[in-house]
Every structure is written in structure tokens, then in C-alpha cells.
């Protein structure tokens, strides 16, 4: 039997995996053991995994079914399941303009940094279950990705607050009017969905907060000031609870897989501060409809489901 080693990144979030060649070791038994490790550690880091896009898609399909690259953004023409992200000069200029920064060190307050935290694609009714990201071109320093364990975030709250949150739903949305038409002819939005604020994991039965600073708009049933205050508190907890975080340092041919149902992440917050290119390729596994402790199931308000490729 293949020996798979797990080296935890922190006591509760993330692990580095040794002894697996993801380009070739995709037997049902290996996939089952990796899935078990993913459910336990939430984030798996694999070093020295040279592979091509087709092999990354095969890995993605082994864990469920590869979706299109993104609900709004087109993937590669030669492989629509792969999203290429390059922190180019154009991207850095766009980030700087959006942040209103004239210097990369300005504006890096905790409140600004918390806005980077998100769960992938919560603006669709069925966010992807798993995200897989592979380092193609990595700068010598910087560009790290941060992860937060949303189950631990939930468990760290008081029982009374958890009981209240169990009954709530939040509206998530995204509209990108400048987005190019999708190659497959499907709508590129706008998208909006209402999700339970607390999600019950479909495989483990554990509860986690479904909070995403990028896409959450409001909590249903609360007055605007109440909604804003509660969201502010939850996002401050998400960004400020260092004990639930893990930091992944990228290298070329590093591959990171995370359970998008149980962790949030924040991309490089230092992208304005280095000139080297950073290119990663992303694929995602199709997800189901989130369900809350009270039985509420996510509903689409605008846009369709994020389906697996045929």
C-alpha cells in the first residue's frame, strides 16, 4: 500500500502531504485516503507535483466532477475547466485603482485586509465543493495564500450566538457587467443566492460559518444596521482569529487542495509590493446546495447552478 505522510501546518488547519504523485497516483484507494485527509485537515499542500492541465483536470474529476473554470470568467480555450490567474502589471494596476492606493503600504489596515477573505463562488446557489490551485510561475518571495477554518470559527463563538446564527440566511451576489461572454454560451451573470449563514457539511455533519467578505451583501430578516453590525463582527472574527489560520508559501509545482465548504481563504495581500509574475491554474469540483441546521436549503435569486462540465 502507498505510504502517505501528513505533516500538519497548524494544530487545526492544513497539512502537507508526502508520498503521492498526483499525476499518476489516482487509484480509488488513494483518492479515498486523500479525501479523508481533506475532510480532517481542510487544506492539503502537495509539493513537487509537476503536471499539465489535463492531469490537473483528471485529479479534479477524481474528487467529483470538474466544473467550468468560473461562473463568470472564461477558462482556457483549450481546456475550459482551467482558470489561469496572472498577477501581471495590468492586474496590479487594477488592484491599486480599486483599493484607492497611491502606495502599496497605504490602506493595509485590518479592516481592509479582512475584505480579502472569501469562500469561492458563493454568489451561485451551489458553490464548488473543492478548489485545486497549482503554482505555475511563482515569485521568490511573497504571494502566500491564507486559509481560515470556518468550523473552528463557528465553534469559537458562544453557544447562544451559535444558536442565533443557526437560524439566519445571508444574500450573496456578484455582477460583472464588463465580463466577456462565456465560451460555452452560458450566462455570465448577474448571480445572486441566499445561503444559510451556518452550513452543515454534507459529508461530516459538522457546522461552519458560510461567510465570504467579497460576496456577502446582507443578512435576511435583520434591519440594515443590524445586518451590517453582525457581518462586521463575523468578518472581524474571520480575519482576526489567528489560531484558526494557516499560511501556505508557494513554490513552483506546489498544488493546494482545499475544502471550499469548510474554509475561507485570502489571496496575496502583498501583490502590489513585488514585480515578479505569479501565475496559478485553478480547477474546481462541483458542489451541492448548502443546507443549514434548521433545514434551510440555498436558493438561487439570479442565475443558474454551477454545473460540472459534460
Image (spheres, rainbow, N blue to C red):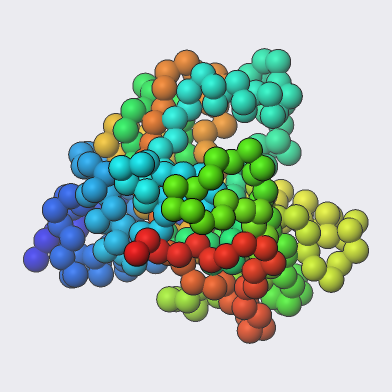
Image x and y of residue 31, in percent: 24, 65
The answer to which image quadrant residue 153 occupies is: bottom right
293 versus 122 height, above or below: below
Give x and y (percent) for residue 41: 40, 60
Q: Nearer the viewer, residue 277 or 238?
A: 277
Name the residue located 72 percent from the left edge and 65 percent from the top edge. Answer: 170
Is residue 67 left or right of 94 when viewed as pictured? Answer: left
Quadrant showing the C terminus: bottom left
- Across and down, in percent, residue 269 comes to 57, 32
Please give the name of the residue rendered at 70% of the width and 15% of the height, measured from the top-left corner: 102
Along the viewing direction, whichever of 281 and 5 lies nearer the viewer: 281
Question: In the displayed structure, does residue 172 sit left or right of residue 4?
Answer: right
- Between 6 and 306, the residue placed more toward the observer is 306
Question: Residue 304, image x and y in percent?
Answer: 57, 65
The answer to whether 305 appears left or right of 213 in the picture is left
Q: Please, which residue is most extreme toward the front here?
A: 185
Q: Is residue 270 visible?
A: yes
The residue located at (59%, 77%) in the rendering is 291
Q: In which quadrant of the rendered view does residue 50 lie?
A: top left
Q: Residue at x 72, y 62 (%)?
A: 171
- State whether residue 270 is above or below residue 27: above
Which image quarter holds the N terminus?
bottom left
Task: Report the residue that reaches farthest toward the left.
Answer: 1
Amino acid at each position: 500500500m502507498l505510504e502517505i505522510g501528513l505533516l500538519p501546518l497548524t494544530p487545526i488547519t492544513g497539512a502537507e502531504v508526502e508520498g503521492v504523485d498526483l499525476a499518476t497516483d489516482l487509484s480509488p484507494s488513494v483518492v479515498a485516503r486523500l479525501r479523508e485527509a481533506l475532510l480532517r485537515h481542510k487544506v492539503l499542500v502537495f509539493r513537487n507535483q509537476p503536471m499539465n492541465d489535463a492531469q490537473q483536470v483528471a485529479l479534479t474529476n477524481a474528487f467529483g466532477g470538474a466544473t467550468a473554470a468560473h461562473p463568470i470568467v472564461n477558462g482556457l480555450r483549450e481546456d475550459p475547466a482551467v482558470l489561469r490567474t496572472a498577477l501581471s502589471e495590468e492586474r496590479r494596476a487594477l488592484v491599486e485603482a480599486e483599493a484607492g492606493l497611491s502606495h502599496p503600504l497605504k490602506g493595509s489596515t485590518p479592516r481592509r485586509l479582512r475584505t480579502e477573505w472569501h469562500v469561492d463562488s458563493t454568489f451561485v446557489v451551489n458553490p464548488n465543493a473543492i478548489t485545486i490551485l497549482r503554482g505555475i510561475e511563482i515569485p521568490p518571495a511573497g504571494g502566500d495564500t491564507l486559509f481560515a477554518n470556518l468550523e473552528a470559527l463557528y465553534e469559537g463563538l458562544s453557544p447562544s450566538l451559535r444558536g442565533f446564527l443557526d437560524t439566519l440566511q445571508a444574500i450573496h451576489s456578484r455582477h460583472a457587467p464588463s465580463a466577456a461572454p462565456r465560451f460555452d454560451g452560458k450566462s455570465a451573470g448577474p448571480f445572486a443566492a441566499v445561503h444559510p449563514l451556518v452550513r452543515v457539511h454534507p459529508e461530516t455533519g459538522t457546522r461552519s460559518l458560510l461567510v465570504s467578505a467579497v460576496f456577502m451583501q446582507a443578512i435576511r430578516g435583520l434591519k440594515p444596521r443590524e445586518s451590517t453590525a453582525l457581518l462586521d463582527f463575523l468578518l472581524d472574527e474571520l480575519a482576526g482569529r489567528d489560531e484558526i489560520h494557516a499560511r501556505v508559501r508557494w513554490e513552483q509545482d506546489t498544488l493546494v487542495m482545499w475544502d471550499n465548504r469548510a474554509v475561507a481563504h485570502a489571496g496575496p495581500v502583498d501583490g502590489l509590493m513585488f514585480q515578479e509574475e505569479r501565475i496559478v491554474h485553478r480547477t474546481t469540483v462541483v458542489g451541492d446546495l448548502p443546507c443549514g441546521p434548521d433545514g434551510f436549503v440555498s436558493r438561487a435569486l439570479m442565475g443558474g447552478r454551477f454545473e460540472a462540465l459534460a
